[in-house]
Amino acid sequence: MLVHFQTSAYATITMFGEVAVPLIKLMGHSGSVPGALLAADVPRALERLRTGVAEHPGLRLDPRRDDDDERRHVSLAHRALPLIELLEAAAAAEANVMWDH
């Protein structure tokens, strides 16, 4: 499953569901897709996502990979960066954020 994040303040970003859903949960949302944040809720979601990333920077979101192949592991901080940038832009523009399949 692919998840598309959209806001009027930033380009649409697309992530695999196994990456997107844990990030949505770190934002304090249920993890359901589709979903949305009202503009007033975006700053708090951004804060929660940043806190979650800071607390678990090496968290592995790709369970299908072999543990022996650490070279291909992408950290939570790197995976979350596009979503953090989208949320920052949405917060600055006071725009809603939506995500769907």
Image: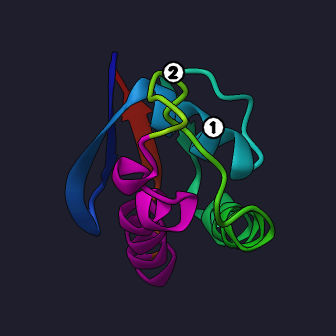
Q: In this view, does 14 lie to the left or right of 89?
A: left
Seen from the viewer's position, the closer of residues 89 and 59 is 59
Q: What residue do we see at 72% from left, 39% from top?
A: 29
Magenta span of residues: 69-93
Q: Looking at the image, which residue is at 55% across and 27% down? A: 63
Q: Where's residue 98, x and y in %? A: 43, 41
Mark 1 neighbour class, 10 Å CA radius: few under 14, some 14 to 19, many 20 or more: some
Measure the alpha-carbon separation of dots 1 and 2.
11 Å
17 to the left or right of 51: left
Q: Is the magenta region chiefly helix, strand or loop?
A: helix
Q: Does the magenta run of residues contain 84?
A: yes
The residue that label 2 is drawn on is 33
Which image quarter holds the N terminus? top left
In terms of depth relative to the viewer, which is nearer, 95 or 75? 75
Q: Name the residue under label 1.
A: 22
Q: Which residue is drawn at 38% across and 77% down?
A: 89
Q: Residues within 10 Å of mark 2 (few under 14, many from 20)?
A: some
